[in-house]
Amino acid sequence: MAENTPIQLSAARANEQQATARYRAGLANITEVAEAQRLLTQAEIQMTLGHIQGTLAGPLTAALPAAFRWNKALVALYARLTACGKTHKVALIACARKLLIYANTVVQRGTPWTENAA
């Protein structure tokens, strides 16, 4: 699937451009444009997930179990996302992103992590 993602993305972009042009010419309705934009957004998300899996997935997913054990904010974020209907994979990626933000903040400030930092 990952090898087809760039092809799907370019096809979705072309489809969205065609739908927009047809709408402007009066040959299509707004729902066709909205559907084309939804498909484009989905293709962009899949492309982004593929990049994340290829570059950051290893180190970040290796750090997540320890982070879940000690960081209640990540546990709460995961619970909130899954309660809203997000898939396990999407929720884990959001938690990995948040963990990366935490790590960058610690490095930037030069101070150790504290849970209740203001």
Image: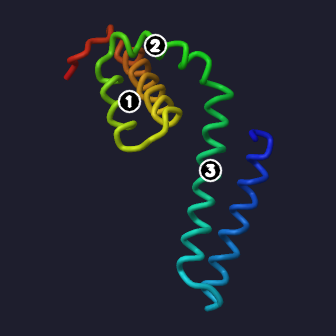
Judged left or right of residue 46, residue 116 is left
Residue at point 55%, 13% (across, down):
62
At which x and y percent is residue 48? Answer: 61, 41
The residue identified by callout 2 is 65
Task: Say what amino acid the circle numbered 3 marks.
Answer: Glu
Q: CA distance from mark 3 to mark 1?
A: 23 Å
The N terminus lies in quadrant: top right
Quarter of the view holding residue 86: top left
Residue at point 74%, 46% (across, down):
5
Label 3 CA crowd tier, 10 Å (few <14, some 14–19, many 20+): some
Task: Say what amino acid the circle numbered 1 marks.
Answer: Tyr
Q: Are marks 1 and 2 in contact (CB under 8 Å)?
A: no
The residue identified by callout 3 is 44
The residue identified by callout 1 is 78
Label 1 CA crowd tier, 10 Å (few <14, some 14–19, many 20+): many
Residue at point 43%, 9% (across, down):
66
Location of residue 114 with respect to 33 vertically, above or below: above
Q: CA distance from mark 3 to mark 2?
A: 28 Å
Disc 1 secondary structure class:
helix
Location of residue 24 with respect to 45 vertically, above or below: below
Location of residue 43 with respect to 12 vertically, above or below: above
Give whichever of discs 1 and 2 has the lower sequence position: 2
Quarter of the view holding residue 49: top right
